[in-house]
Image (cartoon, helix red, strand yellow):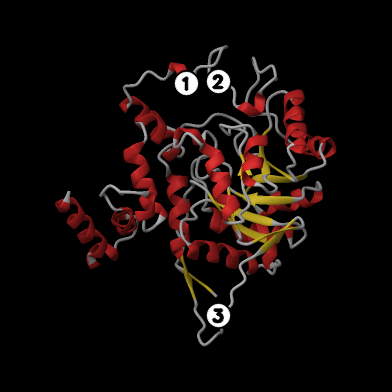
Amino acid sequence: MSNRRAFLKFLAGNPLLAALPGGLPVLAQSLVQTGDAGLASAADALNVLEFEAAARRALPPAHWGYVESGVDGDESLQANLQGFSHYQVRARRLVDVSRIDMSTTLFGSRWETPIVLSPIGSSSIAHPDGELAVARAARAKKTLQIVSTQASYPIEAIAAAHGGPVWFQLYTTSRWDVTGRLLKRAEAAGCPVVAVTIDTPAGRNTETQARFRRLDTRTCGSCHTGPNGGSPPKPIFDGLEMKGVGLTSPALTWDVVKRMKGATTMKVMLKGIETREDAERCVEHGVDGVIVSNHGGRAHSSARATIDCLPEVVQGVSGRIPAMVDGGVRRGTDVFKACRRASLRRTAPRCTGATSTSGATRPTTRRTRTTR
């Protein structure tokens, strides 16, 4: 183990390797930063990357594969992570920073931080309390939480644990009556905003997940098979006839967005916008906000880093509606870069938020840039 650690440090610090194009130095640095010794407790982690290393050791292979996998060769996932490193901070000195206000306001609600907890499904695979534990932590830190359609607990219980307004992430199912019922349930739970995921109209080739599943010798039928075959329905679907209903719809269009706007009192955001053109159409169709996202690198292969997509999306909305971003956020400097990249297009700072997800970032080759 010590020899492996020494070798990784050699890779990370080797000046010859640092001069090479590509990701080897970045990979080596990442491996060193995650550490490879077991953590005695979560409090011992120095950064969120160490949580990932600890989770890989603790979770069954199939569950870790689900958490870790991107699409195809994980290029989009890695692009999200690496994208932030392509921007540096141009620091100004002798500025009074004794009092810092990091609060932001979204749809009339004030939050202490621009960091938002993005929707993650099936959180109970990592801890029995799943989203309830996340909600309690969000409550303690006065942080906004977005609850996934695939959450392991009822949205009402999660909202109660949070103690404040939570947002609801929606997959538009293949049947409108089911989608409409989900909207009404989220409304009744007090959700002021629904974030509609639009980047997964079809299945995905998650090779990493399949690879780890092969390593898992457990029989998972009892927890992964529902009464009608396939995966068991999540609590949000309780009381609904789900036989033959797809979680996502390949027929999701702007007409469906219009219908959704007319069917709910919640603010409607679209999660998965990556281009200026789609951002402009969001404004045209009365969408209330956008989230720049590629599903944490899990939506499609060869995706651009979300941090690279952000400026053109902000340009498209032109300050008329809020723009948020997720994917690849691992450190406070990433949050700062995301907020600054958004404000470069002259949108109000309160209109941006950096959401933390399990994503990663960046497939295009560009010169290193400076964030002013």
What kind of element bears circle 1? helix
Please tell me which residue is depicted at 31% across the width and 27% down the height of the picture. Answer: 215
Kind of residue indicated by mark 1: Cys
Q: 268 or 205, which is in the foreground?
A: 268
Kind of residue indicated by mark 2: Pro
Query: Residue 51 location, x and y as percent?
Result: 39, 49
Q: 75 or 28, which is in the foreground?
A: 28
Q: Is residue 361 visible?
A: no
Q: Which residue is mark 2?
A: 232
Kind of residue indicated by mark 3: Ser
Q: Which residue is mark 3?
A: 98
Q: Which residue is mark 1?
A: 223
The reply to whether the C-beta atoms of the residues labelled 2 and 1 are less than 8 Å apart is: yes
Lateral position of residue 169 relative to residue 73, left or right: right
Q: Which sits earlier in the primary sequence, circle 1 or circle 3?
A: 3
Please tell me which residue is depicted at 55% across the width and 43% down the height of the picture. Answer: 295
What kind of element bears circle 2? loop
- Residue that lies at the very extreme toward the right in this rendered image: 262
On the image, which quarter does residue 176 sit in? top right
- Residue that lies at the very extreme toward the left in this rendered image: 3
Q: Which sits earlier in the primary sequence, circle 2 or circle 1?
A: 1
